[in-house]
């Protein structure tokens, strides 16, 4: 291994993991054999640098540059190719931000961008334009207080989604500062944390973190899983601790070409997620951030995957397929067409096997 001096205790420490992240080509080259596409990329300077925790890097195949986990983390030359539909802030979050760090798009809930720090940099990141700006520095408390005031003054906000960056890169006490203030606002009914940390840095899910989080129920967590190879014993254990603390876990998965764009891979991922008590929540069409065309599938591909799941596996294993509309329209669900026709009798529906069924609409009495 690349860290001959690391003790077992080091390896299991989340701060050691963060402090020893891979963030240069020189370091990466010591553990993986770079492909021509990766080498070409290494010569150029890119907007989004590299960051991979030692734990997550240990899952990378050193020889196979097409390995899914490797492709999501190691830059390739294609990142420098821009397509006309791509934008730095595809979701138009900056236009729907009433105060810094808050996105208020939907009537009853807000997205709170708590920090720009992430434990690992996904090459397809929707917020790559804000992640890593200030590499390892978290936001100042004063900036949060403005956002907290906004939430306090808006009684229609019943759901606060903490994201970033990744909120779980912060210390327990910083997180608790936020959670306790949010909990003291009577109209905030639920709090959610969006994070990839349990996947790329499962060591972060310590008994003390979990004990703290438990005090702020109802608290939900949206994890970010991409491929079944991410579900290791360490990750399983982290999810068990969170689920045992009563935190409902969901997964948001991004559909990506050559990485997880097959029914069989998705089914395998979603089945494994259910076994570690994570419910697939959203399946996203890959957002058009600059240099992401090599990841994007045709919309038809997502529909084909949903079609291949519905009826063939548990409904719990099927996420909502959504496109986050460019320009700030929000998440729009897309579904295979199960309505063949609507006529005066009712609906002619198609089931998963392609057979037609008439549902007669009840007449008013
Ligand atoms: C995704 C998102 C939410 C949460 O959406 P849900 O469908 O409720 O999970 C809220 N605000 C913004 C800006 C979002 O992008």
Image (cartoon, rainbow, N blue to C red):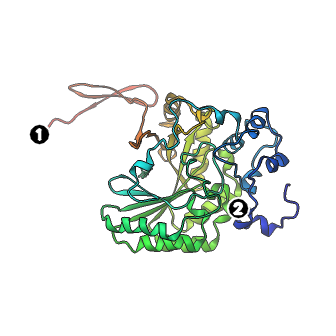
Tell us which disc is closer to us: 1 or 2: 2
Label 2 near ligand 1 (CB < 8 Å): no
Could you say which disc has been placed on residue 365 in the image? 1
The answer to whether residue 213 of the structure is visible from this angle is: no
Q: Which residue is mark 2?
A: 18
* Element under disc 2: helix
Q: Nearer the viewer, residue 251 or 233?
A: 251
Residue located 42% across and 72% down the image: 183
Q: Find residue 201 and report its horizontal and vertical position in percent.
A: 67, 59
Q: Find residue 306 and report its horizontal and vertical position in percent.
A: 49, 35
As displayed, is residue 42 above or below residue 307? below
Quadrant occupied by the C terminus: top left
Q: Nearer the viewer, residue 342 or 81?
A: 81
**Which of the 4 quarters of the picture holds residue 270?**
top right
Could you say which disc has been placed on residue 161 in the image? none
As displayed, is residue 59 above or below residue 76? below
Residue located 66% across and 51% down the image: 231
Q: How many marks?
A: 2
Specify whether 89 is left or right of 240: left
* Element under disc 1: loop
Residue located 73% across and 63% down the image: 19
Quadrant occupied by the N terminus: bottom right
Specify whether 16 is left or right of 319: right
């Amino acid at each position: 291994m690349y860290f001959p001096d690391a003790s077992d205790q080091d390896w299991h420490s989340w701060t050691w993991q963060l402090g020893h992240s891979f963030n240069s080509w020189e370091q990466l080259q010591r553990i993986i054999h770079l492909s021509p596409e990766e080498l070409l990329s290494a010569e150029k300077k890119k907007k989004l640098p590299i960051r991979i925790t030692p734990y997550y890097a240990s899952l990378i195949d050193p020889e196979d540059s097409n390995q899914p986990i490797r492709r999501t983390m190691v830059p390739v030359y294609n990142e420098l190719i821009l397509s006309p539909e791509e934008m730095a802030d595809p979701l138009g979050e900056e236009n729907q931000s009433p105060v810094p760090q808050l996105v208020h798009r939907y009537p009853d809930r807000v997205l709170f961008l708590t920090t720009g720090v992430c434990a690992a940099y996904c090459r397809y990141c929707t917020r790559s334009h804000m992640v890593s700006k200030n590499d390892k520095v978290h936001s100042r408390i004063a900036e949060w207080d403005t956002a907290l005031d906004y939430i306090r003054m808006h009684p229609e906000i019943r759901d606060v989604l903490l994201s970033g960056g990744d909120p779980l890169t912060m210390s327990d006490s910083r997180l608790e500062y936020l959670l306790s203030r949010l909990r003291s606002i009577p109209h905030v009914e639920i709090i959610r944390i969006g994070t990839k940390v349990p996947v790329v840095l499962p060591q972060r899910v310590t008994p003390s973190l979990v004990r703290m989080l438990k005090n702020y129920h109802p608290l939900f967590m949206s994890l970010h899983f991409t491929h079944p190879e991410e579900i290791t014993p360490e990750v399983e254990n982290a999810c068990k601790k969170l689920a045992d603390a009563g935190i409902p876990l969901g997964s948001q998965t991004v559909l990506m070409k050559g990485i997880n764009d097959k029914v069989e891979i998705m089914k395998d991922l979603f089945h494994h997620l259910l076994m570690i008590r994570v419910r697939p929540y959203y399946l996203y069409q890959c957002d058009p951030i600059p240099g992401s065309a090599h990841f994007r599938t045709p919309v038809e591909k997502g529909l084909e995957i949903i079609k291949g799941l519905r009826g063939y596996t548990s409904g719990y294993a099927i996420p909502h397929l959504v496109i986050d509309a460019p320009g700030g329209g929000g998440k729009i669900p897309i579904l295979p067409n199960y309505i063949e026709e609507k006529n005066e009798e009712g609906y002619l529906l198609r089931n998963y096997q392609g057979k037609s069924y008439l549902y007669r609409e009840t007449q008013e009495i």
